[in-house]
Amino acid sequence: MTPGKSAETARPARRRLSVDRRREELMAAALELFSKRDAEDVSIDDVASAAGASRALVYHYFGGKQELYVAALRSAAEQLESRLRPQEGGRPLDELSAGLTRYFDFVEEHAAGFAALLRGGPANRAGEVGEIVDGVRQRLFRLIQRQMRVDQPSPVLRITLRSWIASVETAGLDWLEHRDIERPALEKMLVDQMVSLLGVAAGYDADVNRLLALLTQEQVA
């Protein structure tokens, strides 16, 4: 009797773990497909086949393709955002460089999730998908703003930072596709691009000019 009761007691725990693992497997399979094809071109059958599961099981866990798509993108976004938590204590450009390293760690370790996330925008910015993608970009924007010790960016600085974020996203996708440049070199190039963009913006905004002077002075010090 006791062994039987012990088995019954343990069984629900195993099922809970199995449910979590199965959901993760389905989302991983979906992210892999969404990273290569537009969401409308991926069917529930495609996801089920890639995950080695039944069509009915996918519907059981997610209700439909849109729910699966949103859940998969949200999972990728949460993982990326966890890497973007500020780690202060250094000079602004050093903090920016460290943040880029964490960003590209995610790009490398979760290639399908990163690619699928960016395929969700900017073309598809409506509804939950757009909110997820914009949420990641806004967090990255706030992180950079905090690193540069800027409370309220001017329009010129705002445009400059958002342009740089777009460059980082494009660089991440290009690196995943080609991998023909070493990551440290790419990350350094992107930091240098930020300085160059700020240099251009400084000609249009006195506040950016002062910020650039402060950043470069701190870097030399």
Image (cartoon, helix red, strand yellow):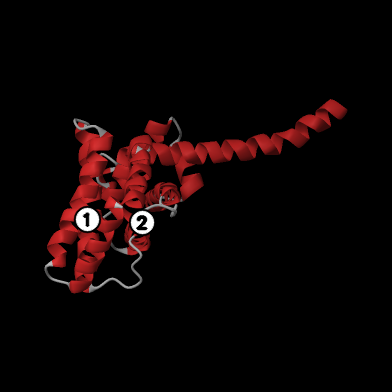
Look at label 1 and name its amino acid: Trp
- Dividing the picture into quadrants, the one containing residue 58 is top left
Query: For the view shown, which residue lies furthest in the right direction?
Result: 1
Viewer-nearest of discs 1 and 2: 1
Residue 147 point in image, percent of width and height: 36, 59
Kind of residue at disc 2: Val
Which numbered tag is attached to residue 193? none
Whether residue 138 is visible to the viewer of this picture, yes or no, is yes
Left or right, residue 15 beside residue 167: right
What residue sits right under mark 1 in the picture?
164
Q: Where is residue 199 in the image (x, y as percent from the top left)?
A: 15, 60
Judging depth in this view, the residue of 96 and 159 nearest the camera is: 96
Q: Is mark 2 on a helix, strand or loop?
A: helix
Look at 21% across and 35% down and name the residue there.
177
Callout 1–callout 2 Cβ contact below 8 Å: no
Task: Judge from the rendering whether residue 77 lies leftward or rightward of residue 211; answer left or right.
Answer: right
Query: Residue at 34% across / 36% down in the picture?
Result: 108
Cα–Cα gap, marks 1 and 2: 14 Å
Task: Looking at the picture, tell me which residue is in the foreground, 176 or 144.
Answer: 144
Residue at (82%, 28%) from the top-left corner?
4
Disc 1 on helix, strand or loop?
A: helix
Q: Position of residue 136 (x, y in %)?
A: 36, 56
The earlier-in-sequence mark between 1 and 2 is 2
Q: In which quarter of the image is the N terminus?
A: top right
Count of numbered badges drawn on the protein: 2
- Within 10 Å of disc 1 (Cα), the crowding (few <14, some 14-19, many 20+) is some
Q: Residues within 10 Å of mark 2 (few under 14, many from 20)?
A: many
Q: Is residue 67 found left or right of 184 in the rendered image?
A: right
Q: Which of 160 and 8 is in front in this view?
A: 160
Give me the residue at 36% from left, 71% from top.
151
Residue under numbered circle 2? 136
Q: Quick check: can you spot residue 124?
A: no
